[in-house]
Image: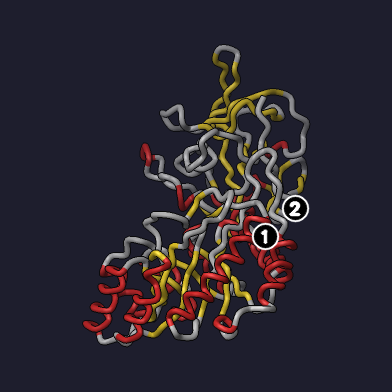
Amino acid sequence: MKPVGPIPPGFAAIDGELAIAGRKASDLVAEAGRTPLFVYARERFDARVAELRAALPPRVGINYAVKANPMAEVVAHMAGLVDGFDIASSGELAICQSVGIDPARISFAGPGKRDDELAAAITAGVTLNCESAGELARSLKIAERIGQRPRIAMRVNPSFELKGSGMKMGGGAKPFGIDADKVPDLARHAMAAGAEWRGLHIFTGSQALSAEAIIEAQANVLALAAQLAEEIGEALPKLNMGGGFGIPYFPGDEPLDLARVGAALTERVASLPPALSETELCVELGRYLAGEAGVYLTRVIDRKESHGVTYLVTDGGLHHQLAASGNFGTVVRRNYPSCIATRFGAAAEEEVNIVGCLCTPLDRLADNAAMPRADVGDLVAIFCAGAYGASASPSGFLGHGPAAELLI
């Protein structure tokens, strides 16, 4: 038997069913009209941002990484909660624009921005986090052609990384960002060419649960930013310190000690070097804001046995939940937090494999998991589905199409 990951706190049962924001899973499915279904709860976004505000020093703003969950209704809701938005494509820019977000609150990162994306961002007044000398040259040329002053920041590839992170975005050769030693000359060149200097973006990694690792990374980021500001010879308007705050997905994972991270950052912000004395500071978070706000609901459409093993076959799968299937960066497959939503809180009665509807052995949602008995028609819930679920899964695979999404 394999354990499942820890279900985030705050979920309860109503009439023996999983309740999300006080509403039964079956009622939410009825409202959406079908399964599979992603459900995102406003109250959980609100609570997470409130926790961050309480823990972080007031001077440190919060940016939402739209790639974590780009559903337009989610982005619109976040507009009233966070200070800024970080995008990674012109498609995400269009989403932000469609819900009325001020472009001055948006920054655009990504190592492969096309010319039309650069033009759209410059025209809108978005800050470009330039990732190479070539991208900076193209941006300045495009800005000159369209007659608009570009807002330019530099994404830095630091020599250090976020220890223990799920995805390392710094340290050594990387497609992301400009090597730190090349940043000062490029920043001065951008300003000499007439660009509005907007500062630095230093992102070192993601999905870290160690407070010590995040505290160390933030200290390194602040030190590097101060050094680069002095070498550039101009005040640093803004520093995006990146994020990296992780959430528990797997058995044995412990929540990030946010209070420790906040206390350490508060101490550092209180004694910043002169080069950063007037700098606007922010952290960039996606998964930490959205992950635990979402639940994926899928219906059992068949129950079968093969060589003594029980399979619950659902109408969902890896085409909506690639990460939960173990095919999104994990080396050893482990079970995400999951349950039989229509028997939430009931005692386990059997060991089952929960699989999706796709014709591939990779389509697994839970292996050898202890669950209450479930039959055709029951609902399965996969938790921590608010980030990198719908937005990071191959919804076109085998033609089953995307899941429904509902913000409540």
The picture quadrant where one finds residue 64 is: bottom right
In the rendered image, which residue does mark 2 sit on? 10
**Which residue lies at the image location 67% right of the left edge and 69% below the top edge?**
265
58 to 337, vertically: above or below: below
User: Can residue 173 be seen?
Assistant: yes
Nearest the camera: 153 or 350? Answer: 153
Mark 2 closeness class: few <14, some 14–19, many ≥20 residues within 10 Å: few
Horizontal and vertical percent position of residue 100: 47, 77
How far across and how far down the image is residue 183, in percent? 39, 72
Residue 165, compared with residue 327, is above or below; it is: below
Give the total number of marks visible in the rendering: 2
- SS at mark 2? loop
Callout 1 crowding tier (Cα within 10 Å): few <14, some 14–19, many ≥20: some
Residue 332, percent from left and from top: 54, 33
201 vs 228, nearest the viewer? 228
Q: Which residue is mark 1?
A: 44
**Amino acid type, mark 1:** Arg
| Image: 114 above or below 97 | above
* Residue 46 position by quadrant: bottom right
Whether residue 406 is visible: no
Q: Position of residue 204 (x, y in %)?
A: 51, 59
Q: Name the amino acid type tagged 2.
A: Gly
